[in-house]
Image (cartoon, rainbow, N blue to C red):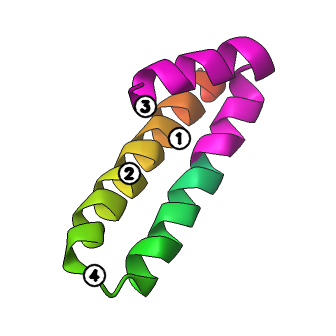
């Protein structure tokens, strides 16, 4: 399952406001994992996930402010 599908399900179940907070929390979680990672293979995954969820957070935040 891709992140987009996961996010859609979270929005459907919890609403945009909680989904926005979730995106921020997940992004921070992946940033923590990225900074603690000793394995270079993990860095790429954590970096991608952190950025993806942060971008989703930014987009949802824009929607809230509109």
| Residue topped by disc 3 | 3
Q: Is residue 34 above or below residue 7?
A: below
Residue at disc 3, secondary structure: helix
| Residue topped by disc 1 | 57
> Residue 38 location, x and y as percent?
33, 88
- Image quadrant in which the N terminus is located: top left
Q: Residue at (21%, 78%) from the top-left corner?
A: 40
- Kindly report which numbered mark, 3 or 1, lies closer to the viewer in this rendering: 3
Residue at disc 4, secondary structure: loop
- How far apart are labels 1 and 2 at the CA level? 12 Å
- Label 4 crowding class (10 Å Cα cut-off): few <14, some 14-19, many 20+? few
Q: Residue at (48%, 40%) from the top-left corner?
A: 58
- Going from the N terminus, do you reach mark 2 or mark 4 first? 4
Residue at disc 1, secondary structure: helix
| Residue topped by disc 2 | 49
- How far apart are labels 3 and 1 at the CA level? 12 Å
Q: Are marks 1 and 2 in contact (CB under 8 Å)?
A: no
The residues colored magenta run 1-23
- Going from the N terminus, do you reach mark 3 or mark 2 first? 3
> Residue 42 location, x and y as percent?
29, 69
| Residue topped by disc 4 | 39
Q: Is residue 41 magenta?
A: no
Residue at disc 2, secondary structure: helix
Q: Is residue 47 above or below residue 39?
A: above
- Label 3 crowding class (10 Å Cα cut-off): few <14, some 14-19, many 20+? few
Q: Residue at (42%, 23%) from the top-left corner?
A: 4
């Amino acid at each position: 399952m891709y992140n987009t599908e996961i996010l859609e399900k979270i929005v459907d179940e919890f609403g945009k406001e909680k989904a926005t907070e979730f995106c921020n929390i997940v992004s921070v979680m992946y940033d923590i994992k990225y900074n603690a990672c000793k394995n270079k293979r993990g860095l790429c995954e954590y970096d991608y996930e952190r950025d993806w969820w942060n971008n989703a957070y930014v987009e949802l935040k824009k929607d809230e402010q509109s």
